[in-house]
Image: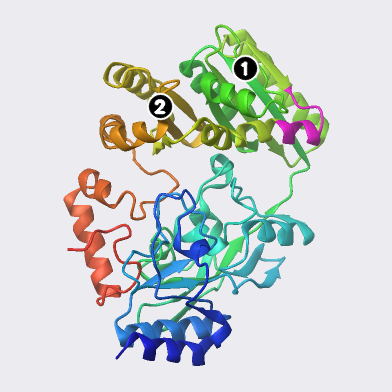
Amino acid sequence: MTAAALLDTLRQTVGAAHVLTEGDLSAWEQDWRRRKSGRALAVVRPGNTAEVAAVVRACAAFGTALIPQGGNTGLSVGSTPDASGTQLVLSLSRLNRVRGIDAANLTMTVEAGCILQSVQEAAAQAGFLFPLSLAAEGSCTIGGNLATNAGGTQVVRYGNARDLCLGLEVVTPQGEVWDGLSGLRKDNTGYDLRNLMVGSEGTLGVITAATLKLHARPVAQLTAWAAVPSMEAAVQLLGLAHRHLGAGLTGFEVMNQFSLSLVARHMPQLRVPFVGMDGAPWCVLLENSDSESEEHARARFEHLMERAFEDGCALDAVVAGSIAQARELWHVRESIPLAQAEEGLNIKHDISVAASRIPAFIAHTDALLAREVPGARLVTFGHLGDGNLHYNVQAPKGGDAAAFLREQEPRVNALVYDAVAEHGGSFSAEHGVGTLKAETLVQYKSPVALRMMRAIKQALDPQGIMNPGCVLLED
């Protein structure tokens, strides 16, 4: 069986216009961060679940590896083909229908290629909230969000993508279709196949559709930006927010002053509160969403901030007076990665540590890097509410950023990941493992866990055609 015969079969299955082999395929062959470029045998774009299943069956018959791909916005190089020219990129972009909304069951069923922002808008048009929110929501797809168990800014209240999913439709590595789209909140009939597929990064099957949880839209939404004297104070403020706001606490972000200074430098059109403020090495952005009245929500929020000042865990604060002002504050927070990119290449980390242990982790790791990598600048920000930090390392001022990345990345990664492990954390909080961190998984995951994961992979994908080299290194 030849590659040409496989391509002929695929053209008959999905149409010749949707089997791409020529021209510029970089949109599918290069990862979003431009860390890796590959060469695909073809990019295939099926239009429905039946076509996905037929494509997978053909690849299984020919022994051809498949790389499932959504919006190609991943940060761990988990959907990029290798350089062999033998792997097939399976793009889910044409599976983009909202199949239905069940208002009484508070669910919506969508296909994997739906853009996250489109899912949010469809929910809003029906009078509901789909709360998954990411910086890439204008281009990432719900299938990719589920395949990587994406997080975002509202995990503290609503959970990761896994917590927002009630059911899946999946094409298995043999080309069969598992229909698990029931939308049931209680189904205690054996192994949880849904949660096995969520976060598997396309290594166990192809997610083609999902039934998602919907929530009532909040009546009131309040946002504040506070300057805090230390990371310990930020954690103290988080505790106060939990006690005073309860389930209303929607988001709790933290940013160090250097990360904010990059936004101020590279995006001068943005107003960055308290940037450069003496005695305030950190700033916090917190949001409260309430189902009660605006007056009730504002009273609780103001009482929280008064208590924060009394306890000394907030030095100053700005409370958004309108939705537009709240969006401006969030825009500053969401601009940090773009500002960091403008500053130059950098070493990125997506780590998680229990919120109670983050101050100790920061103190330990900051001091360690200052000693071992003199001049390195730390861009630390992220979702303190759920313990997820983006602990990024920028080259010394005026240094060669590309050379710094090339020469220092393995050593810096080892220092940071060892510190994460020492503090009981994870080296990947929301970005997944992909191929970028597959070797790291072997170092930090227990041998028992790795054996269990390999057993699952072998049982479901004995040919090893589903996203080889992603998550688990090949034996």
Residue shown at 32% from the left, 22% from the top: 369
Residues rendered magenta in the picture: 319-328
Residue shown at 67% from the left, 34% from the top: 330
Residue 301 is situated, as x and y percent measured from the top left of the image, at 71, 25
Quarter containing the N terminus: bottom left
User: Relative to residue 103, is residue 197 drawn left or right?
Assistant: left
Q: Splitting the image into 4 quarters, where does residue 46 fall?
A: bottom right
Residue shown at 49% from the left, 22% from the top: 235
* Total marks placed: 2
Residue 453 is situated, as x and y percent measured from the top left of the image, at 26, 60
Kindly identify which residue carries mark 2: 395
Inspect the image, locate mark 1, and give the three-letter code of the amino acid beneath it: Val
CA gap, disc 1 to disc 2? 21 Å
Q: How is the image coloured?
A: rainbow
Secondary structure, mark 2, is: loop
Specify the principal SS of the magenta part.
helix
Mark 1 or mark 2, whichever is nearer to me = 2
Residue 275's disc number:
1
Lower sequence index among marks 1 and 2: 1
Inspect the image, locate mark 2, and give the three-letter code of the amino acid beneath it: Ala
240 inside magenta stretch: no
Q: Nearer the viewer, residue 230 or 407?
A: 407
